[in-house]
Image: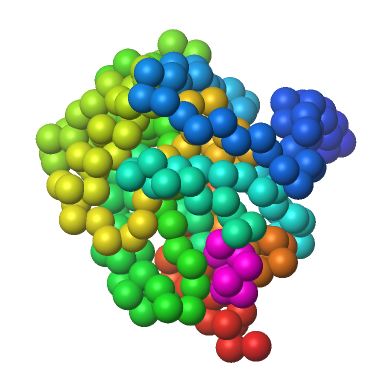
Amino acid sequence: MKNQFVYLIFSLLILASCKGKDKKEIPFIAPKDTDIVAPCKSEGAKNGFEFWDYLGYAPQTQIPNLTLVELSGKPVEFYEVLKENKPLVLISGSYTCDLTRKNLPAIEDFYQKYGNKVAIYFVYTTEAYPKDADAYSIGSEKRFSRENVEAHIEANQPKTFGERKTLAQKWVKELNIKVPVLLDNPSNQFWNYFGQAPNMAYLIKPNGMVIEKEIWLEMNKFERAVQQLISK
């Protein structure tokens, strides 16, 4: 009973923190390089990583119409992409996210196999393991990734949108990423609305309905969901 009560309270807090989340349109203002990136703290991390499944949009719910920009600055509106009548795949990541780096070979292979049948994007969000401001730490805890240390991956949390874009460009170049990359807005709209976790994945039908949401990307499971959808 106590756990059920805690889950209920947490659900209400999530709904309150995401007020307006059910609106179809999320206002878009073209970001400038000098725009300050908003500080952020994952609700999942603040609650001991026990409530990740409550973050973002659940299967059988509608996503809002969010617009992000490519590294070139070109806006990409989700519902304009969906007008091509292809499913939309969104995978979040960052330069310091060791999970994204581990999954990258499988993600790139997925892109080569399904890129003509599914619209696929990386969404570059807040850093997973920065040297300074950490969105996923609990209290004053200092987190680090052994995999990042071994791979000599190190970066501060970007303070401006220009710094975020520069770090994303470094990420793409160093890892030879072929998947198109979108940049989360300075206010971290994607991260706040779609789920405050470092390596999420969404499969979305052309009507905007979520089919599969993974807080921690499991590529084999995710690919099966894609295969099932496009075979219908």
State the residue in front, 74 or 144: 74
The number of numbered badges drawn on the structure is: 0
* Position of the N terminus by quadrant: top right
Looking at the image, residue 158 lies above or below residue 100 = above
On the image, the x and y values in percent for residue 110 come to 37, 72
Q: Is residue 213 visible?
A: no
Q: Nearer the viewer, residue 228 or 49?
A: 228
Residue plotted at (38% across, 18% down): 34
Picture coordinates of residue 176, whole percent (x, y)? 18, 56
Judge left or right: residue 102 versus residue 200: left
Q: Quadrant of the C terminus?
A: bottom right
The magenta span reads: 81-88
Nearest the viewer among 24 and 204 is 24
Q: Going 70% across and 48% down the picture, which residue do you hit?
A: 64
Where is residue 18 shown, x and y percent of the image?
A: 72, 31
Colour convention: rainbow
Answer left or right for 133 relative to 119.
left
**Residue at horizontal 28%, vertical 21%?**
156
Prevailing secondary structure of the magenta residues: loop
User: Does residue 46 appear in this view?
Assistant: yes
Left or right, residue 147 beside residue 152: right
Q: Which residue corresponds to the image point at 63% horizontal and 67% vertical from the top-left?
A: 83
